[in-house]
Image (cartoon, rainbow, N blue to C red):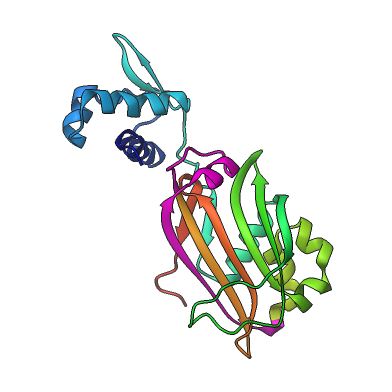
Amino acid sequence: MPLSLQIATLLRNRLQLGEWRVGDHMPTLETFMLEYGVSRVTMRMALAELEQEGLIERARGRGTIVIADITKERWLILPTQWHALVSHIHALHARVVERASGWRKPVLQPDEGRLAEAYWYQQRVNWTHEAPYSFMTIYLEREVYERHPERYRHEAVLPVFDKAEGKRLAAATQVLTITTADVEIATALQLKVGAPIGEVRRIVRNRRQEVLYLAEAIYPARNLRVETNLLPT
């Protein structure tokens, strides 16, 4: 990621945390240059990025002023408990745009379980709030898919899957990795190439350790909030 975009991302995160509110003056260009150890050109490019996004306004003689509130932008929650995750996804009321589908087996790591005989897969973009919020590749074991094929194609998968298969589930895991968007992901999620994204690999197995559901989900990091109960009761 270009240095100017890295700085813009850091400043955007500070805006999301409420360090500067609407109407506040941000520090001067020179202050930011010293803080981040970058050149004037790089710092101007970073601020221009935020201005283009409609977050700040720069005017000669007035400095840099915050004009948008993004403190509530992290609306996409990634719970670490199954039922909380299913409930959150259901509440998003996603609109599904299919990109590809068919029959294909996923590739598993040694500790991820056993493959079943066949899998339906779908690549999709989920939309809500008039914006794309996830790019997903989903694999469903054939018998699971064939019980509700139309719903799986057009609805958020996890709520349907949980209601239909909940009693068969023995293990569910997800792993989050932070990385950056390539051209395909940036285009699908309306991001800039190199923007931070969260990649989630989610796997659900039955008692025989067969994988019933596998999803590779990609979310814009700017919308993502991870919730973990460190002292579960």
Residue that protrudes farthest toward the top in the picture: 61
194, above or below 166, in the image = above
Give 180 or 30, whichever is nearer the viewer. 180
The segment highlighted magenta reads 167-196
Give coordinates of residue 69: x percent, y percent: 46, 32
What count of labels does the image hold?
A: 0
Query: In which image quadrant can residue 60 be found?
Result: top left
Residue 22 seen in this snapshot: no
* Residue in view at x 54 percent, y 51 percent: 76
70 lies left or right of 39: right
Q: Quadrant of residue 152?
A: bottom right
**Residue closest to the far bottom:** 208
User: Residue 159 lies in what quarter of the image?
Assistant: bottom right
- Residue 197 coordinates in the image, percent (x, y): 46, 50
Q: Residue 184: within the magenta?
A: yes
Q: Position of residue 77 (x, y in %)?
A: 53, 55
Provide residue 48's location: percent of width, then percent of height: 38, 23
User: In what quadrant of the picture does the N terminus appear?
Assistant: top left
- Give me the residue at 69% from left, 84% from top: 168
Q: Residue at x 46, y 45 (%)?
A: 222
Q: Is residue 15 left or right of residue 26?
A: right
Q: Is residue 45 left or right of residue 169?
A: left
Left or right: residue 28 compared with residue 151: left
Check the image and report above or below for 224 versus 27.
Answer: below
Q: Is residue 206 visible?
A: yes
Quick check: is 216 in the magenta stretch? no
